[in-house]
């Protein structure tokens, strides 16, 4: 393997692609190393029976200020600006209109307390109100979808920082968010797929990286691996990096997984409709039905619902999702559904979970994680963004930031 690059970027997800974009045209030579056999990381549009299915990121959150919206337009991708259907329930099945309003009001009250009455311990579960106890499982389920973890694991300050910065616009891309992100890799970028970095150490004038395919000695490295990878032992790091790894421990990945069911023949599912499996079960799945009119149901699982999916295995998870739909729609739906494909983010060694959340009292760890190390290691990745963490646009922006820091340190234009 060539050891010539000025800068190596570890990871070719949204952050790595952002870093490569930030370095393009500076005259610095750049190589991206990616452990997976594809680019995109948690941005991955998989084609199944001709349908582009987003296994990871799907929604352009804060779409009106999301840099991927403009990139999509520049590249000629259609952006679907329809409102979300998350708060609707197909034919009111299992979740009557009045109950939906009551559950949403309980969630809104909890959200208001996040901003108005942050608790001393910074733990989001401390803001659950006894008078709203009926909807605690519902609020926990939303926490699973939003953060990948239940409220006991969530920092109020961190959640509030995201919430205050986010806009209410969430748009989608019929061609897939993963397709867009992969298309934005700079043309001609030196990219090595299926290459896992095993160790990172400082060397005179630069950094030494070892991989099964050889050693590289760039002048600087941009690290974009997830917090679970950084905190784990798959990569050997310099000892001085312990504070960065401790910050990564404070920002674990939650659990979020998707299952896709193919709809066979003319089954009774309306296009772009939605069902919440069981509003009184914190581990419930939520179902997005016939996205863009395609014959598919996307089943989304968060927190312990996603954990159960990983532990039970794919077949059992599909059976459970179909059971939940049959309980709502009648047992006849079973013959209209076929398991298609499923994510396993937690079981993918180079990823390790869904997206990062700060543990109570640990929101400052995002800034701690984002600091450069010895002006030679620069840190990007969704977890390093102070407000737009857990998103593909936060990851992208963090890559641009880290590229700017590396350019300043290396003295290039
Ligand atoms: C189920 C799910 C749904 C989501 N939905 C949305 C959504 O709707 N909207 C949204 O904005 N975001 C969403 N996200 C979050 C979004 O996908 C991520 O925040 C973003 O893609 C993270 O990008 P990243 O570059 O920081 O990290 P990654 O995408 O994890 O990139 C890091 C890369 O580093 C590689 N790597 C790790 N270790 C090594 C090594 N040793 N050597 C070489 N390479 C290595 C990994 O393989 C990976 O490709 C979702 C995520 C999931 C899992």
Image: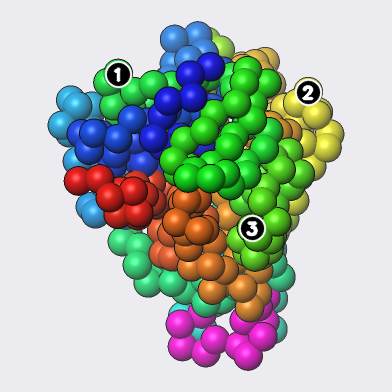
Q: Count residues near mark 3 (Cα–Cα under 10 Å), then give few for <14, some for 14-19, many for 20+.
A: some
Q: Earlier in the sequence, mark 1 or mark 2?
A: 1
| Magenta-colored stretch includes residue 117 | yes
**Is residue 238 on the magenta stretch?**
no
| Marker disc for residue 315 | 2
> What SS does tag 3 mark?
helix
Give the x, y percent position of residue 338: 65, 16
Mark 3 lies on residue? 241
The span shown in magenta is 114-126
What is the C-alpha distance between the residues marked 3 and 2?
Answer: 41 Å
In the displayed structure, would residue 384 be above or below residue 44? below
Q: Earlier in the sequence, mark 3 or mark 1?
A: 1
Residue 412 percent across, percent down from the top left:
25, 45
Depth check, mark 1 against mark 2: the one in front is 1
334 w.r.t. 312: above or below:
above
Q: Which residue is mark 1?
A: 188
Q: Residue at x 62, y 51 (%)?
A: 227
| Nearer the camera: disc 3 or disc 2 | 3
């Amino acid at each position: 393997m060539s050891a010539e690059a000025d800068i190596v970027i570890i990871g070719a997800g949204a952050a790595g692609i952002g870093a490569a974009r930030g370095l393009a045209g500076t005259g610095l030579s750049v190589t991206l190393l990616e452990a997976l056999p594809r680019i995109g990381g948690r941005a991955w549009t998989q084609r199944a029976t001709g349908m582009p299915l987003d296994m990871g990121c799907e929604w352009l959150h804060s779409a009106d200020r999301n840099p991927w919206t403009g990139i999509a337009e520049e590249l000629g991708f259609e952006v679907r600006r329809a409102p979300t259907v998350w708060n609707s329930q197909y034919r009111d099945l299992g979740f009557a209109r009045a109950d939906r309003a009551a559950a949403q009001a309980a969630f809104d009250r909890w959200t208001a307390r996040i901003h108005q009455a942050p608790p001393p311990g910074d733990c989001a579960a401390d803001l659950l109100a006894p008078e709203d106890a009926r909807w605690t499982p519902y609020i926990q389920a939303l926490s699973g979808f939003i953060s990948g973890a239940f409220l006991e694991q969530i920092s109020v300050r961190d959640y509030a920082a995201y919430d205050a910065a986010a806009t209410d616009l969430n748009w989608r891309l019929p061609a897939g968010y993963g397709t867009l992100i992969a298309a934005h890799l700079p043309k001609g970028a030196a990219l090595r797929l299926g290459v896992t970095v095993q160790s990172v150490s400082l060397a005179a004038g630069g950094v030494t990286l070892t991989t099964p395919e050889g050693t590289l000695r760039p002048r600087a490295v941009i690290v974009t691996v997830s917090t679970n990878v950084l905190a784990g032992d798959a990569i050997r790091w310099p000892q001085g990096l312990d504070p960065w790894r401790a910050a990564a421990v404070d920002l674990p990945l939650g659990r979020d997984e998707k299952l896709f069911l193919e709809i066979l023949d003319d089954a009774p599912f309306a296009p772009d409709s939605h069902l919440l499996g069981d509003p009184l079960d914190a581990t419930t799945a939520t179902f997005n039905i016939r996205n863009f009119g395609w014959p598919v149901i996307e089943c989304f699982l968060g927190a312990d619902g996603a954990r159960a999916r990983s532990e039970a295995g794919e077949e059992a998870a599909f059976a459970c999702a179909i059971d939940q739909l049959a309980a709502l729609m009648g047992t006849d739906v079973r013959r209209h559904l076929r398991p298609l494909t499923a994510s396993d983010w937690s079981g993918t060694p180079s990823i390790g979970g869904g997206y990062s959340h700060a543990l109570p009292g640990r929101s400052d760890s995002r800034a701690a994680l984002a600091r450069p190390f010895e002006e030679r290691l620069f840190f990007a990745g969704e977890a390093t963004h102070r407000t737009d963490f857990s998103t593909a646009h936060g990851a992208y922006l963090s890559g641009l930031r880290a590229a700017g820091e590396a350019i300043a340190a290396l003295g290039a234009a």
